[in-house]
Image (cartoon, rainbow, N blue to C red):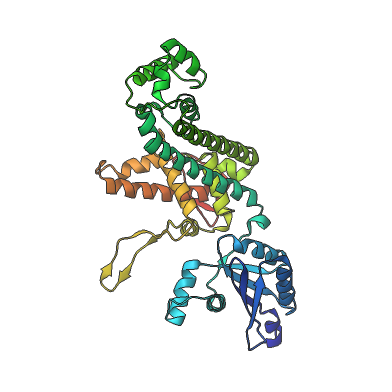
């Protein structure tokens, strides 16, 4: 093969600095000494103009950009649809490289495009998997919306516990057991103040609240306890038609709406993924339920692309890192340079797994803390180790295509399962 043939297969490099209104594009062609700078506005006509310009070189095209909010998604989809190779640049790597090349913290769009192009030439790129083209867009949107609603519900729940209940019904705090339940919000919506309950006789209160509290063991005893507590409550005596009670009920209605939305998303997720083989495999692992499985699939995509579990751990930010210089060696800890939502999901799944009766996660946790069960630092290290084990197990189960088997988790390497 001659030098001309090799040059013909050398790709055109396009470095894009993404922003909300416009994109700074720097193009480098193998047979051109001068780079071409193009400004592309964030609209379809401009995208088509850029695609036509890149195709005019009649060479393979490799495009790289730094993920910027969601502003890169539309452009990346169009470029991928055009058949170009799409790469992703790490935000941290871009910042460090910019400082090293220019010896300055100064930042602007043309400079960032130059740094991205430099990183492309040295191969400092990452794979970009477009969710819409990979068929994971719906899963991602379900997962992210569920996360946003859960966060909003938690924030509202804390607002009720720290503001409204101390004012109007301080004693009600001990009657709730789980923030996932709708009955407590429904009960407070009906009886936002204990003085409303105390104004009724006991039988009338039990009859009015019977259906609201749902199915409970010892329901009559619970309602009798609430009635007795209400008679000696220190809550502020506000009028039933006051604006304060109106605002309290408005917040409670919002909380019930968020719970209903969350439940609807969970039902849609189960219906969507019930026939998905990877979803079924993930749900066999202790600590992983429908939402944790949904989040793992949404954030990690196809886990089979990670040849070794260490690659998946690094993707999650659960790989170990140590700062060392000369004779100094720092403490080894998680790098946390990875997908934060995925790392949090694996941590939560590990916490659920160690609370279950018998599995290898709990067995490892118990062995880890056996020296000093009350040492908080040791328990934290044990939880971190279990979260890493959860990540390895998730990778092994998907990679092997076999369901979880207690005390037999392993990693996949060269087609073999390593215990």
> From where the camera sits, is residue 245 visible?
yes
Q: Quadrant of residue 354?
A: top left
Image location of residue 128, percent across then percent down: 60, 63
Report the front residue among 131 and 181.
181
Residue ID at (62%, 43%): 277
As drawn, is 274 to the left or to the right of 361? Answer: right
As drawn, is 278 to the left or to the right of 181? Answer: right
As drawn, is 165 to the left or to the right of 5? Answer: left
Farthest bottom residue in view = 33
Image location of residue 213, percent across then percent down: 48, 22
Please tell me whether residue 161 is drawn above or below residue 210 in the rendered image: below
Report the front residue among 335 and 391.
335
Number of marks drawn:
0
Image location of residue 65, percent across then percent down: 58, 69
Q: Quadrant of residue 49?
A: bottom right
> From where the camera sits, is residue 355 visible?
no
Residue ID at (50%, 67%): 91
Residue ID at (48%, 18%): 209
Quadrant location, the N terminus: bottom right
Image location of residue 142, percent across then percent down: 60, 45
Please tell me whether residue 159 is drawn above or below residue 208 in the rendered image: below
Report the front residue among 43 and 370.
43
Please tell me whether residue 270 is drawn above or below residue 418 in the rendered image: above
Report the front residue among 412 and 183.
183
């Amino acid at each position: 093969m001659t030098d001309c043939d090799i040059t013909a297969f050398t790709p055109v490099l396009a470095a894009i600095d993404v922003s909300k209104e416009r994109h700074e594009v720097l193009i480098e062609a193998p047979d051109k000494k001068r780079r071409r700078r193009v400004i592309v506005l964030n609209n379809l006509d401009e995208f088509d103009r850029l695609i036509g310009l890149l195709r005019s070189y009649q060479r393979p095209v490799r495009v790289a950009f730094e993920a910027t909010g969601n502003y890169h998604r539309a452009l990346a989809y169009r470029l991928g649809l055009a058949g170009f190779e799409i790469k992703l640049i790490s935000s941290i790597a871009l910042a460090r490289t910019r400082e090293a090349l220019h010896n300055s913290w100064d930042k602007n769009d043309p400079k960032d495009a130059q740094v991205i192009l430099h990183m492309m030439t040295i191969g400092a790129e990452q794979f970009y998997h477009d969710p819409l083209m990979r068929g994971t867009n719906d899963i991602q949107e379900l997962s992210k919306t569920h996360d946003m609603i859960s966060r909003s519900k938690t924030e509202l729940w804390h607002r009720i516990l720290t503001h409204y209940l101390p004012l109007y019904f301080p004693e009600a705090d001990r009657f709730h057991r789980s923030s996932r339940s709708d009955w407590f919000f429904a009960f407070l919506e009906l009886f936002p103040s204990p003085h409303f309950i105390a104004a009724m006789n006991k039988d009338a209160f039990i009859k009015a609240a019977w259906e609201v509290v749902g199915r409970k063991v010892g329901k009559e005893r619970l309602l009798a306890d609430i009635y007795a507590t209400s008679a000696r409550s220190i809550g502020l005596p506000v009028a039933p038609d006051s604006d304060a009670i109106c605002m309290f009920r408005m917040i409670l209605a919002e909380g019930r709406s968020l719970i209903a939305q969350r439940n609807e998303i969970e039902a849609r997720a189960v219906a969507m993924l019930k026939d998905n083989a990877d979803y079924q495999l993930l749900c066999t692992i202790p600590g992983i339920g429908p939402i944790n499985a949904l989040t793992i699939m949404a954030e990690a995509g196809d886990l089979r692309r990670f040849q070794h579990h260490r690659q998946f751990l690094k993707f999650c930010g659960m790989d170990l890192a140590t700062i060392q210089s000369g004779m100094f060696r720092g403490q080894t800890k998680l790098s946390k340079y990875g997908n934060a939502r995925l790392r949090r999901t694996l941590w939560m799944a590990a916490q659920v797994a160690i609370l279950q009766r018998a599995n290898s996660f709990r067995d490892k946790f118990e062995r880890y803390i056996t020296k000093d069960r009350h040492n908080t630092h040791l328990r934290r290290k044990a939880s971190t180790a279990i979260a890493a084990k959860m990540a390895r197990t998730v990778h092994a189960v998907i990679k092997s295509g076999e369901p979880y088997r207690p005390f037999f988790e392993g990693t996949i390497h060269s087609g073999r399962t390593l215990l």
